[in-house]
């Protein structure tokens, strides 16, 4: 297993190497999210799916395959994120999933809170001493991007790609419990873990209701 300092060193080198791509990607995520609130519909869904396909492709190719070769289980992670990217890209044409923010009630406010938490990943990390270039940022890092995608998929229930949903849960729940938090002290990943548990509960509730 890679040592914590070496693990953080890989993340630091990655952040420095890709700058300012992380700014561009989080800005694109913010624009797509604003569109979901302001102009929900087919075109906005295509924009969001295209962003997610681009983001997960970038993470698979650049983060894991090219600049993160020293990270453990790299080929598994690369394959996982390539598959996730492909499923989002395919749904641009298939049109099964429709992201719609809840219009009222506690789900609306919870969704807004969770999205704010995802965008605040770097700020939460700073509370634990993870300043740039140790920041974990939506759009270019796997964990906040997975958390972001899961919030959106919950909003698309029941019309979701179940395979895609499960693949995201595979990353969101066991990895922070077993690896990121206890081994590397990446405590900001409690955000992804919380969203993963929330996403799992909502999926189960939806499946029970359908029966």
Image (tube, rainbow, N blue to C red):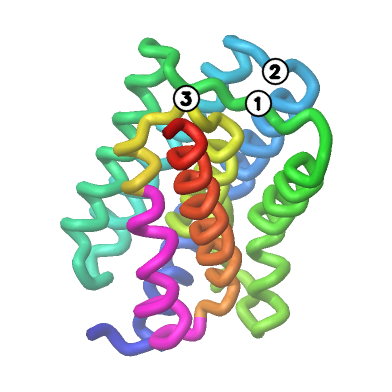
Residues rendered magenta in the picture: 168-185
Q: Compared with residue 186, is residue 31 higher up or lower down, i.e. above or below?
A: above
Q: Nearer the viewer, mark 2 or mark 1?
A: 1
Name the residue carrying label 2: 40
Occupied quadrant, residue 121: bottom right
Estimate the x, y position of residue 170 in percent, counting from the top left. Answer: 33, 57
Observer-nearest of 211 and 6: 211
> Residue 100, labelled with which disc?
1
Judge the density around disc 3: few (<14), some (14-19), many (≥20) Cα neighbours within 10 Å. Answer: some
> Residue 25, labelled with which disc?
none
Q: On the rendered image, what quadrant is the C terminus found in?
A: top left
Occupied quadrant, residue 169: bottom left
Disc 2 secondary structure class: loop
Q: Residue most toward the left?
A: 75
Disc 1 secondary structure class: loop
Of pointers 3 and 1, the one earlier in the residue sequence: 1
Residue 19 at least partly seen: no
């Amino acid at each position: 297993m890679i040592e914590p300092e070496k693990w953080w060193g890989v993340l630091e080198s990655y952040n420095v190497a890709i700058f300012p791509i992380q700014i561009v990607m989080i800005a694109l995520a913010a624009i797509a999210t604003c569109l979901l609130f302001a102009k929900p519909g087919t075109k906005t869904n295509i924009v969001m799916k295209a962003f997610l396909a681009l983001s997960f492709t970038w993470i698979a190719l650049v983060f894991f395959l090219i600049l993160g070769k020293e990270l453990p289980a790299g080929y598994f992670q690369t394959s996982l994120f390539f598959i996730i990217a492909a499923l989002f890209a395919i749904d641009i044409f298939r049109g099964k999933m429709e992201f719609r923010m809840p219009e009222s009630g506690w789900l609306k406010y919870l969704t807004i809170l969770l999205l704010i938490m995802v965008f605040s990943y770097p700020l939460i990390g700073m509370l634990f001493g993870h300043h740039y270039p140790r920041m974990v940022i939506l759009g270019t890092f796997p964990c906040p991007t997975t958390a972001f995608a899961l919030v959106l998929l919950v909003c698309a229930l029941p019309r979701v790609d179940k395979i895609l949903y499960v693949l995201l849960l595979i990353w969101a729940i066991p990895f922070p419990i077993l690896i990121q938090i206890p081994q590397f002290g990446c405590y900001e990943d409690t955000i992804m873990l919380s969203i993963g548990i929330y996403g799992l509960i909502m999926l189960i509730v939806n499946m029970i209701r359908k029966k």
